[in-house]
Protein backbone atom coordinates (compact mmCIF):
# COMPACT_ATOMS: atom_id res chain seq x y z
CA UNK A 1 0.00 0.00 0.00
CA UNK A 2 1.42 3.37 -1.03
CA UNK A 3 2.19 6.08 1.49
CA UNK A 4 -0.34 8.92 1.79
CA UNK A 5 0.49 12.20 0.13
CA UNK A 6 0.56 15.36 2.24
CA UNK A 7 -2.76 16.33 0.70
CA UNK A 8 -4.35 12.98 1.54
CA UNK A 9 -2.97 12.99 5.07
CA UNK A 10 -4.54 16.42 5.70
CA UNK A 11 -8.05 15.10 5.04
CA UNK A 12 -10.52 14.10 7.75
CA UNK A 13 -10.04 10.48 8.85
CA UNK A 14 -12.93 8.53 10.36
CA UNK A 15 -13.08 4.99 11.76
CA UNK A 16 -16.69 3.80 11.80
CA UNK A 17 -18.33 0.91 13.64
CA UNK A 18 -21.87 -0.38 13.32
CA UNK A 19 -24.50 0.15 15.98
CA UNK A 20 -25.29 -3.44 17.13
CA UNK A 21 -29.02 -2.64 17.42
CA UNK A 22 -29.61 -0.90 14.10
CA UNK A 23 -26.67 -1.93 11.96
CA UNK A 24 -26.15 1.72 11.08
CA UNK A 25 -22.52 2.81 11.03
CA UNK A 26 -22.80 5.66 13.53
CA UNK A 27 -20.24 4.72 16.21
CA UNK A 28 -17.14 6.55 15.12
CA UNK A 29 -13.67 7.73 16.05
CA UNK A 30 -12.62 10.69 13.92
CA UNK A 31 -9.56 12.92 13.58
CA UNK A 32 -10.26 16.03 11.53
CA UNK A 33 -7.80 18.14 9.55
CA UNK A 34 -7.17 20.37 12.60
CA UNK A 35 -5.98 17.45 14.72
CA UNK A 36 -9.16 17.22 16.83
CA UNK A 37 -10.18 13.78 18.07
CA UNK A 38 -13.90 13.04 18.25
CA UNK A 39 -15.58 9.80 19.27
CA UNK A 40 -19.13 8.66 19.78
CA UNK A 41 -20.15 5.40 21.42
CA UNK A 42 -23.41 3.99 22.70
CA UNK A 43 -23.25 2.28 26.10
CA UNK A 44 -25.84 1.35 28.73
CA UNK A 45 -26.10 1.76 32.47
CA UNK A 46 -27.07 -1.05 34.87
CA UNK A 47 -30.76 -0.51 34.17
CA UNK A 48 -30.27 -0.83 30.43
CA UNK A 49 -30.81 2.87 29.79
CA UNK A 50 -28.78 4.29 26.94
CA UNK A 51 -25.88 6.60 27.88
CA UNK A 52 -24.08 8.75 25.35
CA UNK A 53 -20.32 9.12 25.82
CA UNK A 54 -18.72 11.93 23.82
CA UNK A 55 -15.02 12.78 23.64
CA UNK A 56 -13.99 16.11 22.17
CA UNK A 57 -10.34 17.00 22.26
CA UNK A 58 -7.59 18.95 20.60
CA UNK A 59 -3.84 19.27 20.79
CA UNK A 60 -4.25 21.77 23.62
CA UNK A 61 -7.21 20.47 25.66
CA UNK A 62 -9.22 17.39 26.54
CA UNK A 63 -12.82 17.51 27.75
CA UNK A 64 -14.61 14.28 28.62
CA UNK A 65 -18.15 13.90 29.93
CA UNK A 66 -20.44 10.91 30.34
CA UNK A 67 -24.09 11.99 30.34
CA UNK A 68 -27.23 10.16 31.38
CA UNK A 69 -29.86 12.87 30.89
CA UNK A 70 -29.70 14.25 34.43
CA UNK A 71 -26.03 13.87 35.41
CA UNK A 72 -22.58 14.66 34.06
CA UNK A 73 -19.28 13.19 35.29
CA UNK A 74 -16.24 15.39 34.52
CA UNK A 75 -12.82 14.02 33.62
CA UNK A 76 -11.33 15.18 36.96
CA UNK A 77 -13.51 12.67 38.82
CA UNK A 78 -15.85 12.75 41.79
CA UNK A 79 -13.87 10.98 44.51
CA UNK A 80 -13.28 12.92 47.74
CA UNK A 81 -9.59 13.91 47.61
CA UNK A 82 -7.46 15.45 50.35
CA UNK A 83 -4.01 16.97 50.80
CA UNK A 84 -1.76 17.68 53.77
CA UNK A 85 1.63 19.40 53.98
CA UNK A 86 4.37 20.17 56.51
CA UNK A 87 6.91 22.99 56.06
CA UNK A 88 10.38 22.94 57.64
CA UNK A 89 10.13 19.58 59.41
CA UNK A 90 13.31 19.11 61.49
CA UNK A 91 14.30 15.45 61.44
CA UNK A 92 15.62 13.94 64.67
CA UNK A 93 18.73 11.89 65.44
CA UNK A 94 18.82 8.42 63.85
CA UNK A 95 15.51 9.31 62.25
CA UNK A 96 13.08 6.56 61.35
CA UNK A 97 9.52 7.55 60.39
CA UNK A 98 9.34 11.30 59.83
CA UNK A 99 5.86 11.40 58.31
CA UNK A 100 3.00 8.91 58.46
CA UNK A 101 -0.55 8.65 57.24
CA UNK A 102 -2.78 6.25 59.17
CA UNK A 103 -6.01 4.69 57.96
CA UNK A 104 -9.59 5.27 58.99
CA UNK A 105 -12.31 3.39 60.85
CA UNK A 106 -14.96 4.46 58.35
CA UNK A 107 -13.24 4.98 54.99
CA UNK A 108 -10.73 3.23 52.74
CA UNK A 109 -7.71 5.51 52.29
CA UNK A 110 -6.09 5.45 48.85
CA UNK A 111 -2.76 7.30 48.70
CA UNK A 112 -2.00 8.75 45.29
CA UNK A 113 1.06 11.02 45.67
CA UNK A 114 3.79 12.13 48.06
CA UNK A 115 6.26 14.96 47.48
CA UNK A 116 9.50 15.63 49.44
CA UNK A 117 12.17 18.34 49.33
CA UNK A 118 14.75 19.45 51.86
CA UNK A 119 18.13 20.83 52.93
CA UNK A 120 20.85 19.75 55.38
CA UNK A 121 24.05 21.09 56.96
CA UNK A 122 26.44 19.24 54.64
CA UNK A 123 25.18 18.45 51.16
CA UNK A 124 24.98 14.80 50.17
CA UNK A 125 22.74 11.85 49.46
CA UNK A 126 19.87 10.82 51.74
CA UNK A 127 18.05 7.49 51.64
CA UNK A 128 14.25 7.76 51.70
CA UNK A 129 12.13 4.67 52.37
CA UNK A 130 8.38 4.40 51.89
CA UNK A 131 7.19 1.73 54.31
CA UNK A 132 3.79 0.13 54.84
CA UNK A 133 2.87 -1.00 58.36
CA UNK A 134 -0.01 -3.11 59.68
CA UNK A 135 -0.15 -1.39 63.09
CA UNK A 136 0.25 2.26 64.05
CA UNK A 137 3.31 3.83 65.68
CA UNK A 138 3.21 4.94 69.30
CA UNK A 139 5.03 7.62 71.28
CA UNK A 140 7.62 10.05 69.97
CA UNK A 141 7.13 13.76 69.33
CA UNK A 142 4.87 14.67 66.43
CA UNK A 143 2.46 17.23 65.08
CA UNK A 144 -0.70 16.68 63.02
CA UNK A 145 -0.73 18.91 59.92
CA UNK A 146 -4.08 20.16 58.63
CA UNK A 147 -6.06 17.81 56.39
CA UNK A 148 -7.37 19.91 53.52
CA UNK A 149 -10.14 18.73 51.15
CA UNK A 150 -9.30 19.50 47.52
CA UNK A 151 -13.02 20.33 47.15
CA UNK A 152 -14.43 22.30 50.08
CA UNK A 153 -17.83 20.65 49.61
CA UNK A 154 -16.41 17.23 50.60
CA UNK A 155 -16.70 15.93 54.17
CA UNK A 156 -13.84 16.29 56.64
CA UNK A 157 -10.97 13.82 56.18
CA UNK A 158 -10.83 10.74 58.40
CA UNK A 159 -7.19 9.70 57.88
CA UNK A 160 -4.52 10.91 60.33
CA UNK A 161 -1.22 12.50 59.21
CA UNK A 162 1.68 12.86 61.68
CA UNK A 163 5.03 14.65 61.24
CA UNK A 164 7.76 13.50 63.69
CA UNK A 165 10.63 15.58 65.07
CA UNK A 166 11.56 12.77 67.51
CA UNK A 167 11.26 9.13 66.58
CA UNK A 168 8.21 7.10 67.56
CA UNK A 169 8.94 5.17 70.76
CA UNK A 170 7.60 2.05 69.10
CA UNK A 171 7.32 1.56 65.35
CA UNK A 172 4.29 -0.23 63.97
CA UNK A 173 4.53 -3.77 62.59
CA UNK A 174 6.38 -3.82 59.28
CA UNK A 175 4.58 -5.14 56.20
CA UNK A 176 7.35 -4.08 53.84
CA UNK A 177 9.22 -1.30 52.08
CA UNK A 178 7.34 -0.40 48.89
CA UNK A 179 9.63 2.30 47.44
CA UNK A 180 13.19 3.51 48.05
CA UNK A 181 15.06 6.50 46.68
CA UNK A 182 18.54 7.94 47.12
CA UNK A 183 18.18 11.69 46.70
CA UNK A 184 20.70 14.53 46.72
CA UNK A 185 19.96 17.05 49.49
CA UNK A 186 21.90 20.34 49.31
CA UNK A 187 22.60 22.99 51.94
CA UNK A 188 20.62 26.19 52.20
CA UNK A 189 23.60 28.21 50.96
CA UNK A 190 24.90 25.92 48.21
CA UNK A 191 24.41 26.68 44.54
CA UNK A 192 23.13 23.15 43.99
CA UNK A 193 19.54 22.63 42.91
CA UNK A 194 17.33 21.70 45.83
CA UNK A 195 16.26 18.07 45.91
CA UNK A 196 12.65 17.37 45.00
CA UNK A 197 11.10 13.92 44.86
CA UNK A 198 7.53 13.10 43.90
CA UNK A 199 6.16 9.57 44.21
CA UNK A 200 2.99 8.75 42.26
CA UNK A 201 1.30 5.50 43.18
CA UNK A 202 -1.37 5.16 40.48
CA UNK A 203 -0.15 6.08 37.01
CA UNK A 204 -2.28 3.54 35.13
CA UNK A 205 -4.67 0.75 35.98
CA UNK A 206 -2.78 -0.39 39.09
CA UNK A 207 -4.17 0.35 42.55
CA UNK A 208 -2.79 3.21 44.64
CA UNK A 209 -1.59 2.47 48.19
CA UNK A 210 -4.61 1.27 50.21
CA UNK A 211 -4.92 1.73 53.96
CA UNK A 212 -7.75 -0.32 55.43
CA UNK A 213 -8.68 0.35 59.05
CA UNK A 214 -6.97 2.39 61.76
CA UNK A 215 -3.96 0.07 62.02
CA UNK A 216 -2.54 0.40 58.51
CA UNK A 217 0.10 3.08 57.95
CA UNK A 218 2.23 4.43 55.13
CA UNK A 219 5.45 5.99 56.49
CA UNK A 220 8.21 8.13 55.00
CA UNK A 221 11.34 6.84 56.74
CA UNK A 222 15.00 8.04 56.88
CA UNK A 223 16.43 4.57 57.51
CA UNK A 224 17.70 5.35 61.05
CA UNK A 225 20.02 8.05 59.70
CA UNK A 226 20.89 11.36 61.35
CA UNK A 227 20.49 14.04 58.70
CA UNK A 228 22.33 16.89 60.42
CA UNK A 229 20.38 20.09 59.99
CA UNK A 230 17.72 18.13 58.11
CA UNK A 231 14.85 20.42 57.17
CA UNK A 232 12.11 18.89 55.02
CA UNK A 233 8.99 20.05 53.20
CA UNK A 234 6.60 17.14 52.63
CA UNK A 235 3.12 16.87 51.15
CA UNK A 236 0.74 13.97 50.60
CA UNK A 237 -2.45 13.48 48.59
CA UNK A 238 -5.07 10.74 49.06
CA UNK A 239 -8.64 9.70 48.29
CA UNK A 240 -11.23 8.54 50.84
CA UNK A 241 -14.03 6.16 49.81
Image (cartoon, helix red, strand yellow):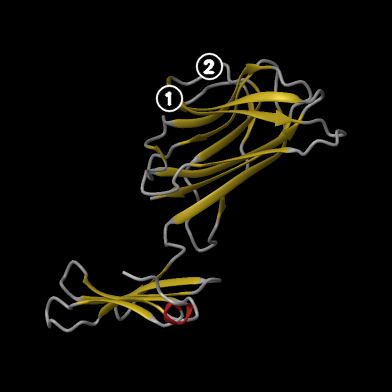
Percent across and percent down for residue 102 are 48, 35
Q: Residue at x 78, y 31 (%)?
A: 186
Q: Residue at x 37, y 43 (%)?
A: 207
* Mark sitting earlier along the chain (2/1): 1
Farthest-out residue, right: 189
* Mark 2 → mark 1, Cα distance in angstroms: 10 Å
Percent across and percent down for residue 136 are 47, 26
Percent across and percent down for residue 183 are 66, 30
Q: Secondary structure at mark 2?
A: loop
Q: Residue at x 18, y 77 (%)?
A: 18
The residue to which callout 1 is attached is 135
Q: Quadrant of residue 88?
A: top right
Q: Is residue 147 visible?
A: no
User: What is the total number of numbered labels drawn onto the structure image?
Assistant: 2
Q: Quadrant of the N terminus?
A: bottom left
Left or right, 48 with respect to 120, comes to: left
Q: Residue at x 55, y 61 (%)?
A: 152
Left or right, 38 with respect to 20, comes to: right
**Above or below 184: residue 173:** above
Farthest-out residue, front: 2
217 or 59, nearer to the observer: 59
Left or right, 88 with respect to 156, comes to: right
Left or right, 18 with respect to 193, comes to: left
- Circle 1 Cα neighbour tier, 10 Å, few/some/many (<14 / 14–19 / ≥20): some
Percent across and percent down for residue 65 are 39, 73
Q: Is residue 138 visible?
A: yes
Q: Quadrant of residue 125?
A: top right
Q: Secondary structure at mark 1?
A: loop
Q: Quadrant of residue 230?
A: top right
The residue to which callout 2 is attached is 170
**Above or below 147: residue 212:** above
Amino acid sequence: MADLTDSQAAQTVKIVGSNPSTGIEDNYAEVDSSGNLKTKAQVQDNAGTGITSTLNGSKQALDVHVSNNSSTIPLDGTRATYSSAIVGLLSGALATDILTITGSATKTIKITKIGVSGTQTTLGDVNLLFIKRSTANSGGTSTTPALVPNDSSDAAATAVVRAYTLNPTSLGTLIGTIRTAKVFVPTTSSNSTEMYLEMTFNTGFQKPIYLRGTGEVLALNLNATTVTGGNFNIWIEWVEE
